[in-house]
Image (cartoon, grey):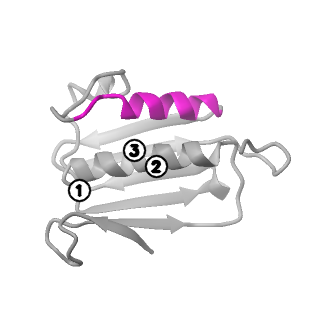
């Protein structure tokens, strides 16, 4: 399913980024706040677009407890990978460097983890691992 495209505004334009969601299973609950999950995902999608990605795929697995955002953008150089979650560190001159730091803080506040794998020139995958929950215990 295509979520939306960002770029020139013309559908099918060469600079358009295509965002897709793929879910292996549905109806799952994870311990996370809905608005904060949205904030984290939007940040990851914007990072992918800013990295020149033409395709970004959001995958939901493990009964909703694992989310990954994979893109085909520029990727991140190995020498800076250890710093990507540091506040104010950015690989671009236009970024504030707060996005991934905030994402990590939010994910860890839910008891989850966030991991990033990247290869220069090939793209980046960010994976969120969330705790499972039930309707009575899931933060809103």
Q: Which residue lies under the disc numbered 2? A: 41
Q: Position of residue 74 (x, y in %)?
A: 18, 47
Of discs 2 and 1, which sits in the foreground?
A: 2
Q: Residue at x 65, y 42 (%)?
A: 32
Q: Residue at x 31, y 67 (%)?
A: 5
Q: Position of residue 140 (x, y in %)?
A: 71, 45
1 or 6: nearer the viewer: 6
> In the image, is residue 13 above or below residue 31?
below
Q: Which residues are magenta?
A: 95-110
- The Cα atoms of the two marked residues, 2 and 3, are separated by 5 Å
Q: Position of residue 103 (x, y in %)?
A: 47, 35
> In the image, is residue 70 above or below residue 14?
above
User: Are the residues at dot 2 and dot 3 in contact (C-beta closer than 8 Å)?
Assistant: yes
Q: Secondary structure at mark 3?
A: helix
> In the picture provided, is 130 more to the left or to the right than 57?
right
Q: Which residue lies under the disc numbered 3? A: 43
Q: Which residue lies under the disc numbered 1? A: 53
């Amino acid at each position: 399913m295509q979520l939306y495209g960002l770029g020139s505004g013309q559908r099918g334009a060469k600079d358009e980024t295509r965002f897709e969601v793929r879910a292996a299973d549905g109806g799952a609950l994870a311990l996370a706040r809905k608005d904060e999950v949205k904030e984290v995902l939007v940040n990851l999608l914007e990072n992918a677009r800013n990295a020149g990605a033409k395709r970004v795929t959001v995958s939901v697995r493990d009964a909703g407890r694992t989310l990954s955002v994979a893109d085909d953008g520029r990727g991140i150089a190995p020498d800076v990978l250890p710093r990507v979650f540091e506040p104010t560190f950015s690989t671009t001159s236009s970024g504030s460097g707060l996005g991934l730091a905030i994402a990590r803080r939010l994910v860890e506040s839910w008891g989850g983890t966030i991991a990033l794998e990247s290869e220069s020139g090939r793209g980046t995958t960010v994976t969120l691992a969330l705790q499972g929950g039930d309707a009575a215990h899931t933060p809103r």
